[in-house]
Every structure is written in C-alpha cells, then in structure tokens.
C-alpha cells in the first residue's frame, strides 16, 4: 500500500502538529493493451461511482469502452463488468457517464457512437445492456441527470442529426428515453449542473449562465457571468449542498477556478479565484463539491482538494499526483474525480495511468488561522520580497517550507516586516508563529 501524506507535505496546513491526514492508494488499474493513438494521447477518460446492493463500484471509460470495478473492498477490487463502446477505436477521447434508478447511461463524443443504457441493478452478479442506439444520440460530450425530475440533459455532440445543442430527455421509463426538446439561446454548452430544474451552464467561451428549466418549452435565463477574471473556456462546475456556492473551471493553462456566490442568480459574485499553483501552466479539468470540500481533477497536477468552508479563502487539504512527468503542455493527467461514495473513498481517472481509488480526506481540527483580513501576506505571488501584516505586537517566528516539508528559510520578524527569502520560482508554504496564534499560507515565488 502506497501512502501519501497530504497535510504536512502538500500544503502544511497542520505543519506537523498533532495529526497528519493521509491518502492511501487502495486500488489501481490500467491495461497496457488499450490503445492511446488519438490526438490527445489518452487511454482513459471519465470516472463515475455507484453504490448499490451493499457494494461500491468505480466506472471508468477508455478508448475501448466502459469498465466497472467492484471496489467494496478496494484492496481486493475486481472487474465486475465491461461494456464495449459502439465505437471502440483509438480515436475515442471523450466518454461520459451518469446513473439513475439502477441504470448507467454512457455516451462518447467521437466516431460512430451511441447512447448506451446498462442495467447495473444486479451487479456484481450480472449486468445487461438494455439500450444501444444512435436514434437520438450519436455523440455527446457530457450528460447530467436531474434525478429529482427524471430528466437527462445532453451537452454537445450530435442529437437528432443536429450538432452542439443542449437537449433534454425524459427518463420516466429509464430504459426508454423520450426526447423533450432542445435549447440553444446561449450557444454551445460544454457541461451542465442541474438542481431542481435550475441549470448552471458551463458555456465555453460564453461564460456561465443560470437557467430555469421548469418549463422546458420556454426556459428562462436567471443570470449570467460573461466577463470575469481569467475568462477562458468555461469547462465544468458544481453546486454546493446549500445552493449558495457554484465553483467552475476554465480549461485554459494557468487560468484559475472561480468560487461564486449564486444566492442571487441575477447578481453572480466571484468570491475568489484559485489554482494549484504547481506550474504557471497548471490547469483544472473537472470538479465535484462534497460537503465543505471541492475535489478537482487537476490534469498534470493530479487530484487536489480544497476546504471551501470560507468561500473567500479556499484552503488546500490534500493532493495526490497521478501523473508523474513534470510537463504541463497539452492535456494529460487526472481527467475526472468522484468523491461521493458512502465509504468516502475517492475515485480518480488519469488519462495515461488509469483508475485510482484513494482513501478519504481526514478532517483536521487544529487551531490554525487562515489568511484573513487581519493576516496579510502581500504581494502573493511575489518576486523578490513580500510584506507581513498580522496586527500582532509581539515578535514572531517565520518559516518557509518546500513541497516536501523541508525547511528552507527561517527568521524572527515583527509586524509589517518585509521578508526577502532567497527562493527559486515555485510554490512554498509559510508558517508564522507567535504566542497568540499560528498563521499558515501558501506563497508563490514568480
């Protein structure tokens, strides 16, 4: 079992205090016989998870098809089902999955593909492909099922021989999808999140739109965000449980994710932006919010997890690198993440390395101050120096660590001190300790 320590190494949030969180690699899978001869060079794509019949399953796509693993006991995980794609050629880059009422829905966005519906209600004992047709859907980039209303939203691709329009299907009879209509008022929709008929549309170059789909014949735009910092290609997003926070990722090298207050859809507010900061070309891909954590498949940087209890100040609580090469060009590494299984185990798909099942993030309850209005470290990122403001009259110990937890710099400081550490370009972790408090923060040297 490979163990990766996350709190003390990746973000030093606990700075080797009383308890360290850790991620255990519980199960991995890859198959070298599966081809990666496409324009991106990926063998694997999307990840999804399902729990039923007392079992947990990891679902991962490849160029060939859909692979379902029983990971109830991850260290004894096994392939429970394989469904060959209608097109299983190396040209397949994108597959996507969602489940509803014991059925798995699978699509692809290349080749001569179809919508596949698989009855997985009897897994791990048996499964059955109950629908495999291009009558409605020949290709699709992403799908999302509003389980409250039994409606499947289909993004991109080719539906009813028309390209790149958002389409709706009723799943009242899960084996027999019924076409309900299309929506193209805001252009191409790359991905969507829907909660109780309210859709959060990741509209590529056009930004973010919030749309009321209560009346599918006449959807209503409730709000939009079309001009914002690091505006690029709005790729994916997720809503928190309370419906107050939506986080989305622009799929552009070096562009930060956005944490938005969507309490009033007519006035979407960006609380802050954030990224791993591992490299100037780091790029987020897909994300899911669970409780107060956002889990991000961060391409070349692997899995990254932030605590978003304070939406204005996300705090890194874990990271696991699924892609070991240090390059940051093109699109490689962690494609998808799924943290919603009852066990808390985290599923990650890596485009080159396959499936990872990781243990849950452990909660740390240490008294650590975050970078609040009273604790300023600026500028950050910095070049040669930065300034510390803590509103603390007493002397403080300042320490800077690298990504491996190695101490690189240490000195005594007073409030409003200017610090000039001799560091190379990269990401580091700062600790400021006094009698009154312990302050921790990620800093970036440009």
Image (cartoon, rainbow, N blue to C red):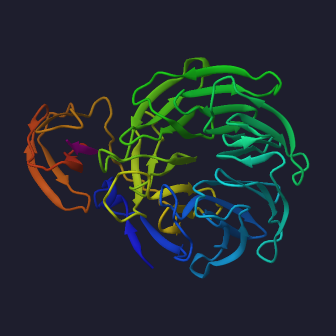
Figure disc tally: 0
**Residues shaded magenta:** 440-446
In which quadrant will I find the N terminus?
bottom left
Report the residue that reaches farthest toward the bottom: 76
Which residue is found at the position 65% from the left and 38% from the top?
192
Question: Does residue 1 lie above or below 287 as drawn?
Answer: below
Residue 402 counted in the magenta span:
no
Residue 445 counted in the magenta span:
yes
Which residue is found at the position 45% from the left and 46% from the top?
284
Report the residue that reaches farthest toward the top: 266
Residue 439 shows in the view: no
Q: Main secondary structure of the magenta part?
A: strand
Question: Is residue 323 rendered to the left or right of residue 204?
Answer: left
Q: Position of residue 420 (x, y in %)?
A: 8, 41
Q: Quadrant of residue 87?
A: bottom right
In which quadrant will I find the C terminus?
top left
Residue 446 shows in the view: yes
Q: Position of residue 418 (x, y in %)?
A: 9, 35
Which residue is found at the position 39% from the left and 62% from the top?
321
For the residue pair 163 and 71, the one nearer the viewer reads as 163
Question: Is residue 160 rendered to the left or right of residue 371?
Answer: right
Q: Position of residue 245 (x, y in %)?
A: 55, 34
Q: Position of residue 335 (x, y in %)?
A: 51, 55
For the residue pair 112 and 13, the one nearer the viewer reads as 112
């Amino acid at each position: 079992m490979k163990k990766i320590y996350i709190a003390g190494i990746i973000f030093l949030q606990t700075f080797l205090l009383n308890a360290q969180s850790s991620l255990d690699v519980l199960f991995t899978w890859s198959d070298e016989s599966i081809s990666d001869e496409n324009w991106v060079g990926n063998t694997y794509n999307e990840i999804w998870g399902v729990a039923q019949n007392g079992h947990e399953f990891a679902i991962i796509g490849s160029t060939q098809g859909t692979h379902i693993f029983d990971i109830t006991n991850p260290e004894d995980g096994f392939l429970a089902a394989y469904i060959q794609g209608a097109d299983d050629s190396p040209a397949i880059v994108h597959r996507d999955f969602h489940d509803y009422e014991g059925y798995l829905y699978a699509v692809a966005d290349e080749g001569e593909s179809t919508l596949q519906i698989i009855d997985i209600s009897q897994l791990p004992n048996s499964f059955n492909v109950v629908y495999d047709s291009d009558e409605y859907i020949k290709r699709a980039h992403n799908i999302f099922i509003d389980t409250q209303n039994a409606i499947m939203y289909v993004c991109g691709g080719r539906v009813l021989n028309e390209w790149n329009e958002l389409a709706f299907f009723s799943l009242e009879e899960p084996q027999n999808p019924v076409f309900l209509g299309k929506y193209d008022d805001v252009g191409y929709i790359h991905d969507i999140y829907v909660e109780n008929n309210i859709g959060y549309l990741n509209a590529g170059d056009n930004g973010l739109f919030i749309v009321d789909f209560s009346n599918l014949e006449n959807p209503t735009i409730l709000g939009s965000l079309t001009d914002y910092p690091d505006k690029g290609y709005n790729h994916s997003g997720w809503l928190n449980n309370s419906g107050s926070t939506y986080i989305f990722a622009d799929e552009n090298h070096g562009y930060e994710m956005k944490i938005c207050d969507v309490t009033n859809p007519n006035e979407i507010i960006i609380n802050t932006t954030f990224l791993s900061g591992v490299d100037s070309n780091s790029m987020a891909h897909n994300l899911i919010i669970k409780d107060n954590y956002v889990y991000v498949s961060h391409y070349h940087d692997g899995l990254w997890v932030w605590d978003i209890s304070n939406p204005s100040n996300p705090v890194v609580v874990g990271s696991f690198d699924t892609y070991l090469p240090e390059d940051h060009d093109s699109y490689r590494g962690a494609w998808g993440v799924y943290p919603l299984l009852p066990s808390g185990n985290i599923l990650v798909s890596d485009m080159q390395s396959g499936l990872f099942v990781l243990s849950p993030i452990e909660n740390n309850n240490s008294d650590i101050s975050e970078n609040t209005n009273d604790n300023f470290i600026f500028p950050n990122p910095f070049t040669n120096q930065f300034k510390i403001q803590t509103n603390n009259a007493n002397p403080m110990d300042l320490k800077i660590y690298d990504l491996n937890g190695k101490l690189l710099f240490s000195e005594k400081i007073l409030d409003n001190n200017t610090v000039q550490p001799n560091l190379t370009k990269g990401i580091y972790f700062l600790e400021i300790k006094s009698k009154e408090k312990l302050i921790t923060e990620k800093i970036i040297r440009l």
